[in-house]
């Protein structure tokens, strides 16, 4: 190989150097703008922490469905999302708030709606069954118990947060 082939002319050197430095500076200016534009999209969906749902006086031993709305921020979009919970007091007087979303394929479960399976949560989509405490009945399609809402009682009202799977699920 001849030595000429490896030589870089002054003009080429300047071209490479200016292109490299220019590219570096452009990236330095553009990155904050791109980050600013994409940040809300990359961020997670923010939900209101706890929402007042019902007066504790209205909660009985019979699971009752209560509907409520939570404020949600998803990127630039703010909305009020409807939620529902099956709420009752257990034998110890503790308030239980269960998600109505079936753990099989997400249909809505109802309390005591199947005459052949009284006092159970029933999912009409594929005949899923859950006990009163939300535990899935073996031999029916759901393979996990109903999610439980984070809850708190304040000034005589029940507040609910997000529904989470049970630890044992
Ligand atoms: S979605 Fe509930 S049993 Fe299938």
Image: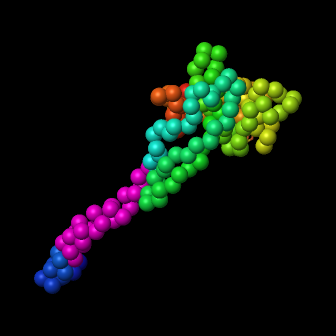
Look at the image and say whether residue 109 sits in the magenta stretch. no
Q: Position of residue 128 (x, y in %)?
A: 76, 35
Which secondary structure is most common in the magenta stretch? helix
Q: Position of residue 140 (x, y in %)?
A: 78, 32
The quadrant holding residue 23 is: bottom left
The magenta stretch spans which residues? 19-44
Decide if residue 102 is on the left or right side of residue 74: right
Q: For residue 103, say whether it is visible.
A: no
- Direction left: furthest residue: 10
- Direction right: furthest residue: 116
Decide if residue 53 is on the left or right side of residue 76: right
Q: Nearer the viewer, residue 113 or 133?
A: 113
Look at the image and say whether residue 21 sits in the magenta stretch. yes
Q: Nearer the viewer, residue 120 or 8?
A: 120
Q: Position of residue 75 (x, y in %)?
A: 44, 57
46 shown above or below 63: below
Please name the residue shown 53% across and 52% down the image.
80
Quadrant of the displayed image that contains ligand 1: top right
Where does the N terminus fall, quadrant-wise? Answer: bottom left
The quadrant holding residue 105 is: top right
């Amino acid at each position: 190989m001849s030595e000429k082939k490896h030589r870089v002319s002054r003009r080429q050197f300047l071209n490479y150097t200016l292109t490299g430095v220019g590219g570096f500076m452009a990236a330095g200016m553009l990155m904050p703008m791109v980050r600013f534009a994409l940040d809300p999209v990359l961020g997670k969906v923010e939900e209101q922490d706890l929402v007042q749902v019902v007066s504790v006086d209205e909660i009985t031993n019979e699971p009752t469905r209560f509907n409520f709305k939570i404020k949600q921020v998803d990127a630039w979009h703010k909305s009020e999302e409807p939620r529902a919970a099956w709420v009752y007091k257990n034998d110890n007087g503790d308030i239980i708030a269960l998600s109505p979303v079936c753990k099989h394929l997400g249909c809505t479960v109802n309390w005591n709606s199947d005459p052949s399976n009284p006092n159970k949560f029933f999912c009409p989509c594929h005949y899923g069954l859950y006990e009163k405490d939300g535990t899935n009945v073996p031999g029916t399609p759901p393979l996990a118990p109903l999610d439980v809402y984070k809850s708190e009682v304040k000034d005589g009202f029940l507040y609910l947060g997000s529904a989470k799977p049970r630890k044992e699920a």
